[in-house]
């Protein structure tokens, strides 16, 4: 009997479970989106955070019903939606995804289901001065990276001299505009309307800067699924179900009937925004190389300055913990534990956005302070351990020779501790060089951020990723080699 259960029954049960799971998978339409994008796209339901609401949620449910399936939401970061769709992590991506030539070249893209316009948002006091991008020469204009709005600003940078400032989300561009950190924002009208409602004193200019479309993205090998979805969308345009969805979210306007009429008549929708032309990957790499080199320079300068700050502050903290009074030691220990025990990303948020009502630090200064203060805690532990590793006999000898504690630190203990600390210091600098990628969250366009914009615009991470890795190696390897040479010289001495 036991043999029958193990050899016959157990495999049969496993097969039945697998078949059941496969059947359930087939009955679901897994759709990817980013709930962090918020309303009206996708957001956690305030009444029940376990479920999501938004117009893209309703569009997904409409498509699932047309396919005879049940919609299931898959949370994916917005910048990862294209890569996740190509991998097949979900059936379709829907999260305010903009139509672009790069997406059309790499993925199976649905017909557009919503037309939007890129518009300019300014402070109410500047509405008469800043009507177009040409009026913003030399001024800072915020947007989201790797979007149609970003393409517009890049074109305006060369034509009108505006300074693009890229953000990771669509909330802080408008809050920073309200407090004066940037001079204008360019994003689609859906986001602009929400930004103006959330921040008093802002105004949306009437003139549209470009036209874009929201689409769904499907893995390239799933073109047949894309075609079925296109049929469902056309039918929903014809019978008014899409109109009902957008009216519920107060997004219906006169642009949509014109779009639907063209699509139902069999017309194709042409991209009419800057940067819409498809570009060869290597040609794009050549075009982006100067921007990547500039971003690498920013990464290097920021990392060197932050490491210098960390070394100075870390040395003071270590000295205070070794030689200071008990209250001072307790205070410095608390600082070290807080800085090591909380995420660097959170510290950057607090410095740049959290302190904005009190002091508006420039983005580069906030990044420098955030990295420097965080790494100072780690450096202090290295220096403290190195100081305590110096043999006690040498310190006794220094006192016997009449040296003060300060003289012993500067002439005997400090130099030997520095030798011991050099290797882990080099390690920390390489780590800081890579952690500098986090500062893109506070609008500093360093190497990783510029690479992600490049990758999103061409629809692939292969070439941009290889170029980014090569530049990081170029920045970090010389330092490691220099540290090894110094160590060998000291060993010979």
Image (cartoon, helix red, strand yellow):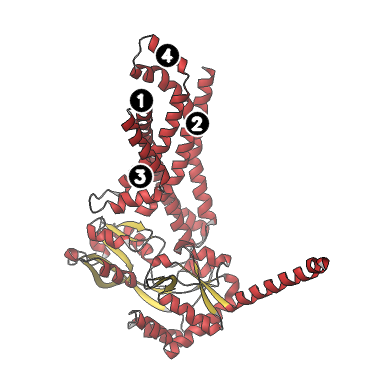
Mark nearest the camera among 1 and 2 is 1
What residue sits 46% from the left and 86% below the top?
A: 236
Name the residue tied to disc 2: 423
Residue 188 location in percent, x, y?
34, 70
What residue sits 41% from the left and 44% below the top?
A: 299
Residues marked 3 and 2 touching at CB (< 8 Å):
no
Assign a secondary structure to mark 1. helix
Residue 136 location in percent, x, y?
24, 60
Name the residue tied to disc 3: 370
Residue 292 location in percent, x, y?
43, 50
Residues marked 3 and 4 touching at CB (< 8 Å):
no
Residues marked 4 and 1 touching at CB (< 8 Å):
no
Assign a secondary structure to mark 4. helix
Question: Quarter of the image containing the N terminus?
Answer: bottom right
Residue 323: mark in rendering:
1
User: Is there any visible trace of residue 111 in the rendered image?
Assistant: no
Mark nearest the camera among 3 and 4 is 4
State how far apart marks 4 and 2 are (Cα).
27 Å
What residue sits 48% from the left and 19% below the top?
A: 391
Name the residue tied to disc 4: 396
State how far apart marks 1 and 2 are (Cα).
24 Å
Disc 4 or 1, which lies upstream in sequence? 1
Disc 3 or 2, which lies upstream in sequence? 3
């Amino acid at each position: 009997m036991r043999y029958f259960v193990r050899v016959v029954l157990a495999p049969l049960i496993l097969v039945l479970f697998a078949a059941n799971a496969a059947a359930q998978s087939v009955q679901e339409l897994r759709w990817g989106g980013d709930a962090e994008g918020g309303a009206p796209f996708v957001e956690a339901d305030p009444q029940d955070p376990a479920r999501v609401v938004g117009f893209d949620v309703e569009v997904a449910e409409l498509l699932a019903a047309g396919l005879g399936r049940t919609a299931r939401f898959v949370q994916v970061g917005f910048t990862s939606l294209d890569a996740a769709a190509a991998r097949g992590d979900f059936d379709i991506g829907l999260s305010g995804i903009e139509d672009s030539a790069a997406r059309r070249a790499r993925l199976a893209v649905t017909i557009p289901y919503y037309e939007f316009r890129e518009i300019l948002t300014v402070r109410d006091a500047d509405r008469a001065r800043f009507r177009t991008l040409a009026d913003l020469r030399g001024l800072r204009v915020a947007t989201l990276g790797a979007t149609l709005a970003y393409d517009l600003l890049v074109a305006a940078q060369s034509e009108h001299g505006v300074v693009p400032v890229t953000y990771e989300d669509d909330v802080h561009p408008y809050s920073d505009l309200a407090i004066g950190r940037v001079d204008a924002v360019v994003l689609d009208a859906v986001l602009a309307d929400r930004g103006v409602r959330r921040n008093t004193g802002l105004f949306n200019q009437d003139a549209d800067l470009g036209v874009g479309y929201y689409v769904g993205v499907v893995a390239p090998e799933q073109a047949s699924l894309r075609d079925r979805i296109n049929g469902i969308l056309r039918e929903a345009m014809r019978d008014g179900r899409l109109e009902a969805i957008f009216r519920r979210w107060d997004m219906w306007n006169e642009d949509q009937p014109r779009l639907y009429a063209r699509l139902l008549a069999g017309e194709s929708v042409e991209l009419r925004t800057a940067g819409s032309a498809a570009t060869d990957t290597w040609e794009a790499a050549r075009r982006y190389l100067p921007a990547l080199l500039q971003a690498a320079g920013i990464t290097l300068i920021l990392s060197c300055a932050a490491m210098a700050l960390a070394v100075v502050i870390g040395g003071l903290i270590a000295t205070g913990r070794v030689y200071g009074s008990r209250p001072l030691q307790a205070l410095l220990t608390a600082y070290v534990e807080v800085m090591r025990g909380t995420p660097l990303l959170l510290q950057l948020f607090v410095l740049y956005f959290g302190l904005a009502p009190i002091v508006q630090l420039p983005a580069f200064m906030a990044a420098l302070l955030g990295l420097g203060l965080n790494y100072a805690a780690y450096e202090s532990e290295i220096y403290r351990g190195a100081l305590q590793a110096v043999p006690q006999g040498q310190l006794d000898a220094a006192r016997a020779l009449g040296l003060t504690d300060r003289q012993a630190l500067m002439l005997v203990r400090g130099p030997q501790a520095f030798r011991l600390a050099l290797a882990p210091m080099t390690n920390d600098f390489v780590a800081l060089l890579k952690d500098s990628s986090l500062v893109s969250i506070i609008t500093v366009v360093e190497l990783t951020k510029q690479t992600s914009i490049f990758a999103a615009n061409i629809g692939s991470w292969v070439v941009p990723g290889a170029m980014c890795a090569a530049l990081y190696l170029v920045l970090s390897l010389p330092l490691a080699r220099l540290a090894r040479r110094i160590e060998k010289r000291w060993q010979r001495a």
